[in-house]
Image: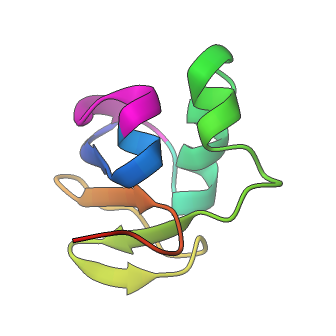
Amino acid sequence: MKTITIRYFASIREALGSGESLQTSAATVAELRDELIARGGAHAEALARGRAVRVALNQLMSSESAELLDGAELAFFPPVTGG
């Protein structure tokens, strides 16, 4: 298990709050996103596979195939965010 800090921005933040820290065995960003979607409710809606969602891993734009390491910071946000 590893500890990941998750941050949400823009409309995703409005739906889910500013973020959370969680324990996961997910190996990749995609696996963690699926884990969050499986919670149902607001998580399933905000992070749904049909929605355009960008990710940054440790403050660098990333693909969902990126490996998650213990202590990583993952950010989810829509393709366009305001300042």
Q: Quadrant of the C terminus?
A: bottom left
Q: Is residue 77 left or right of residue 65?
A: left
- At horizontal 73% and vertical 56% (from top left) the residue drawn is 51
Whether 69 is drawn above or below 70: the answer is: below
- At horizontal 51% and vertical 56% (from top left) the residue drawn is 27
Q: Position of residue 81 (x, y in %)?
A: 38, 69
- At horizontal 32% and vertical 69% (from top left) the residue drawn is 82
Q: Decide if residue 27 is in sight here.
A: yes
Q: Position of residue 18 (x, y in %)?
A: 23, 36
Q: Decide if residue 28 is in sight here.
A: no
Q: Is residue 29 left or right of residue 24?
A: right
Q: Quadrant of residue 48?
A: top right
Seen from this angle, which residue lies furthest front?
82
Residue situated in front as seen by the camera: 16 or 20: 16
Whether 54 is drawn above or below 68: the answer is: below
Residue situated in front as seen by the camera: 68 or 20: 20
Q: Position of residue 46 (x, y in %)?
A: 60, 39
Q: Is residue 41 magenta?
A: no
Q: Quadrant of the N terminus?
A: top left
- At horizontal 59% and vertical 70% (from top left) the residue drawn is 64
Q: Which residues are magenta?
A: 14-25
Seen from this angle, which residue lies furthest right?
50
